[in-house]
Image (cartoon, grey):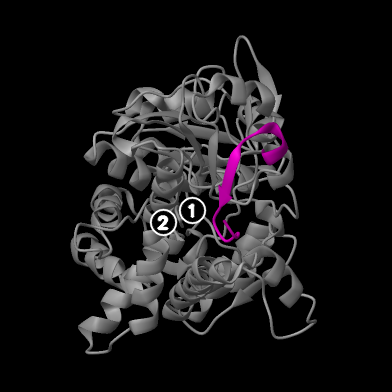
């Protein structure tokens, strides 16, 4: 029997609806594992392929620290989801292949294609006629077709003729993970709306109509909201860039407000909340210590570089990147001002940093503003300690130690709150004041209760608030 792409379209669609098709997800990390989980949960037999043996072992043991750990345990027991580092094993029975590998920036702030090219090279001899490849990795416009041309060159296949190709940009809202350890068990919960993977609308584009239709159908098996078919792969690639750049530019705008309005003795958070009472034409964004992760700050550079290569200037996007990248320095400047008021010099002070991860309640430090703050402090030989309970288990990968909550405040001259993990809301601030040498708090996320801290005797400053 021919594989899915070479079958009659109606038969192929019915096989997808019946879950009578095996699936492989290449790269079962931050993006790929949730995708593999929901594919398996919906009834597909899923192989997860990864180069990290430790990651593969943890998946096959059902022992992964992420927000869907309760679901994956049963899927692994039922063999609906199996992980491997063996390419032949992963692709032997698979007909639909998802590619979810990282696409970071290189030293020139351009997209690094090496992971995608590496995938193409390694799967080449295991590809078969009738397979369907679906890319999810965030990419610059035209990248999917560029990688497909490379695969065509080394494999002899022709996408859209004897093998299918589509692109569906990942949309993933990291939600709180559960962490289990020998001495402690806790769960943290985000405030506001949580969008699990199956409740986030998706868009797809294909190299041809059949690729697009089949891809739309497979996502419809586990996405409970809408899956929109676009006119092309490039349209889907551009959609991902636009939605992230929109956020980057608007965050930069409010970060600039956060530096201006306090000079007029105004609280930017009060102003933004007042502005959002207008029922149309305003979408609230909030300032903070910086923008991290592998999407927002990265995708903006993809389009900046592509535009410049065709002779277009991208002033707004470059300014947005400059402003958002400057927020860690802004926090350091606020710190130096308050230390000086206390007759302290930053060179002789001890600084406590709360939060290493780029976003609340997730164990991911990629592009984190904390890393830039740490770099500045290290460059100036400043004594600092870092605490992040959600990243403790990865501390061996860092070139600086992670301190416990119990020890991070001892003899400290200032606290920099960079990541607003919910677990920090239970801190005993009165005890912390007693542990500190100089009770200064610089709040990068509007996290703490200003009046409560001042009543305890802290000097409290926050990005966007009058000093």
N-term mark: 1 or 2: 1
Question: Residue 245, percent across and down?
Answer: 47, 72
Q: In the current view of this chain or complex, which residue is farthest to the top?
A: 183
**Residue 361 located left or right of residue 29:** right
Please say whether residue 226 is visible from this viewpoint. no
Tag of residue 127: none
Q: Quadrant of residue 86?
A: top left
Q: Which residue is mark 1?
A: 289
Q: Residues within 10 Å of mark 1 (few under 14, many from 20)?
A: many
Q: Is residue 144 above or below residue 416?
A: below
Quadrant placement of the C terminus: bottom right
Q: Nearest the camera: 328 or 76?
A: 328
Q: Is residue 143 left or right of residue 189?
A: left
Labels 1, 2: front one: 2
Q: Nearer the viewer, residue 80 or 237?
A: 237
Figure check: 407 above or below 319? above
Question: In the rendered view, would you say 305 is above or below 465?
Answer: below
Tag 2, which secondary structure? helix
Which is nearer the eye, 396 or 419? 419
User: Where residue 144 appears, x then y in whole percent?
Assistant: 35, 69
Magenta part of the chain:
454-467
Q: How many marks?
A: 2
- 167 vs 198, left or right, is left
Question: Can you give x and y, in whole percent of width and height, for residue 346 in the image?
Answer: 34, 38
- Residue name at image x 46 percent, y 26 percent: 412
Residue at x 57%, y 24% (from the top left corner)? 63
Where is residue 266? Give x, y as percent. 64, 68
Is disc 1 placed on a helix, strand or loop? loop
Quick check: is 368 in the magenta stretch? no
* Residue at 42%, 68% in the rendered image: 165
**Label 2 sits on residue:** 330
């Amino acid at each position: 029997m021919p594989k899915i792409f070479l079958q009659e379209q109606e038969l192929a669609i019915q096989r997808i609806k019946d879950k009578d098709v095996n699936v492989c997800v290449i790269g079962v990390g931050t993006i790929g594992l949730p995708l593999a989980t929901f594919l398996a949960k919906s009834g597909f037999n899923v192989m997860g392929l990864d180069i990290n043996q430790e990651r593969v072992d943890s998946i096959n043991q059902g022992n992964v620290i992420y927000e869907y750990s309760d679901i994956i345990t049963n899927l692994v027991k039922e063999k609906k989801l199996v992980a491997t580092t063996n390419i032949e094993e992963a692709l032997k029975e698979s007909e639909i292949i998802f590619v979810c590998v990282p696409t970071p920036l290189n030293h020139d702030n351009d997209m690094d294609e090496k992971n995608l090219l590496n995938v193409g090279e390694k799967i080449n001899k295991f590809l078969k006629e009738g397979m369907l490849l679906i890319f999810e990795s965030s990419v610059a416009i035209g990248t999917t077709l560029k990688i497909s041309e490379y695969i065509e060159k080394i494999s002899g296949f022709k996408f859209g003729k004897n093998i299918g190709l589509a692109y569906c940009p990942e949309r993933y809202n990291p939600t709180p993970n559960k962490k289990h350890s020998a001495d402690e068990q806790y769960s943290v919960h985000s405030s506001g709306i949580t969008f699990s993977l199956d409740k986030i609308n998706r868009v797809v584009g294909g190299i041809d109509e059949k690729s697009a239709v089949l891809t739309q159908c497979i996502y419809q098996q586990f996405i409970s909201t809408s899956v929109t078919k676009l006119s092309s792969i490039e349209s889907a690639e551009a959609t991902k860039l636009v939605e992230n750049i929109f956020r980057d530019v608007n965050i930069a705008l409010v970060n600039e407000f956060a530096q201006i309005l306090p000079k007029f003795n105004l609280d930017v958070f009060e102003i933004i909340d007042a502005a959002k009472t207008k029922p149309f034409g305003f979408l609230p964004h909030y300032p903070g210590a910086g923008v991290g992760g592998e999407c927002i700050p990265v995708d903006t550079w993809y389009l900046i570089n592509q535009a410049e290569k065709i002779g277009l200037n991208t002033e707004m996007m470059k300014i947005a990147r400059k402003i958002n990248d400057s927020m860690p320095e802004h926090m350091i400047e606020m710190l130096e001002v308050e230390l000086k008021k206390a007759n302290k010099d930053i060179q002789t002070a001890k600084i406590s940093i709360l939060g290493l991860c780029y976003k609340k309640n997730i164990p991911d430090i990629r592009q984190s503003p904390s890393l830039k703050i740490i770099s500045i402090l290290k460059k100036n030989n400043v004594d600092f300690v870092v605490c992040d309970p959600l990243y403790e288990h990865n501390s061996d990968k860092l070139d600086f130690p992670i301190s416990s909550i119990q020890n991070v405040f001892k003899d400290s001259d200032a606290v920099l709150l960079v990541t607003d993990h919910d677990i920090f809301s239970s801190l005993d601030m009165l005890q912390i004041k007693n542990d500190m040498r100089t009770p200064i708090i610089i709040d990068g996320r509007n996290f703490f209760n200003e009046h409560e801290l001042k009543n305890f005797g802290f000097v409290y400053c926050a990005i966007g608030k009058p000093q």
